[in-house]
Amino acid sequence: MKTTLITDITVKDICEGFVYNEFEGKGLFGLSGRLTIQPEYQRNYIYADGKKDVAVIESILKGYPLGLIYFNKLADNRLEVLDGQQRITSFGRFVTDKFAIMDDNNMPHYFGKMDGDKQKLILEAKLLIYECEGKESEIKEWFRTINIAGVPLNSQELLNAVYSGPFVTLGKEEFSNSQNANIQKWSAYISGSANRQEFLERALEWVSKGNIGDYMSRHRIDTNIAELKTYFNCVIDWVSSVFVEVESEMRGLEWGRLYEQYHKQPYDSKKVLTEVQNLYADPYIKNRKGVFEYTLGGSKDTKLLDVRVFDEATKKAVYTKQKADAELNKSSNCLLCAIGHDANKTKIWNIADMDADHVSAWSKGGATDIKNCQMLCKSHNRAKGNR
Ligand SMILES: [Zn+2]
């Protein structure tokens, strides 16, 4: 790979013929059309948060270095941005009055209304640019190893760069476009942001059963994403038809795994809704995120719910009472040992060897209070819990 350091390109040159696509949130062209700002293996523009984009402009005004920018020089003398897309898009958007910077009195200043000397300072700022020439594979491999932009690439952004091609382009059109009206519906079940590729990542994770890189490599040159879309929609449709009401705790659950595990089972969505509502109303449940998998699994695995346990004071009080009764009756202080037929029938256990148990099971409405607490030896408690 050959690299050449270029030091005479200014912000003004870069912004010549700047085209920004508001809809897709990306800068398209600069340098009078010679420069492609967001080639398909680049991530979406994520500086438009009123902080990072403003910081770029303030850096120029204060004369701070903007860091290196890397261009990939193509055969026909055209250029594409390898690293620096976020900064370049910030220049272009500022110069075209898409955002303002604040002064010390918190007053907004747009480029078009700034003093001429300040405008000049910005436009004449020179950039440090490396032009790289090489084979596509070299360039991409190298892009994978540079992480000099303000926000490091996350794992899906890296995968998009490594496996760039028609499949990634189509995938991003569907899942990484925050203007897509479906994103709002999907975000009931998926956490993260479309811009940071987290919806695309979930879609790929679900269809590939977790082998995202492998799946992307196999489909890299596909010119359709039918399987990806269909599988994703199946999962979303399944969740939204089993659980007809959206709860905030649904966001970010492993819906792909749950779909695989349970989608062949029939569910009565009305019964499911009642079950979920009852569980949400239960003050003993500490983990509401577990409610959905618990319900799908036939309301058996209470570990998913992290049900509140008896506190130490309650355990101690119940232990003391049971021990006194046992000594009086010459029987075991474990209520189940006491009615058994082995040597433990009269054994007095230490509190450390016993566990608290719900007399009436929590899942049958039993409360977690002293009236519903009994101490059992550990093996009896375990045996009872497994029933
Ligand atoms: Zn026992």
Image (cartoon, helix red, strand yellow):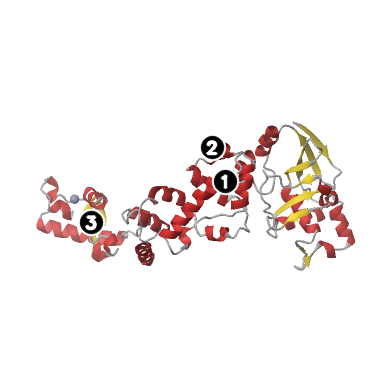
Which of discs 1 and 2 lies nearer the camera? The answer is 1
Q: Quadrant of residue 147?
A: top right
Tag on residue 214? 2
Q: Quadrant of residue 309?
A: bottom left
Helix, strand or loop for disc 2 = helix
Q: Is residue 227 above or below residue 76?
A: below
Q: CA distance from mark 1 to mark 3?
A: 58 Å
Front position in the image: 100 or 358: 100
The image position of residue 186, as x and y in percent, is: 53, 57
Q: Is residue 323 left or right of residue 294?
A: left
Helix, strand or loop for disc 1 = loop
- Judging by the rendered image, the residue that carries numbered circle 3 is 375
Which of discs 3 and 2 lies nearer the camera? The answer is 2
The image position of residue 28, as x and y in percent, is: 74, 50
Q: Residue at x 86, y 59 (%)?
A: 118
User: Which kind of residue does numbered mark 3 sit on?
Assistant: Met
Front position in the image: 9 or 38: 38
The image position of residue 292, as x and y in percent, is: 40, 57
Q: Is residue 381 above or below residue 1?
A: below
Q: Residue at x 81, y 45 (%)?
A: 34
Tag on residue 202? none
User: Which kind of residue does numbered mark 2 sit on?
Assistant: Asp
- Judging by the rendered image, the residue that carries numbered circle 1 is 225
Helix, strand or loop for disc 3 = strand
Q: Is residue 204 left or right of residue 338?
A: right
Marks 1,3: beta carbons within 8 A: no
Q: Of label 1 and label 2, which has the lower sequence position?
A: 2
The image position of residue 171, as x and y in percent, is: 60, 47
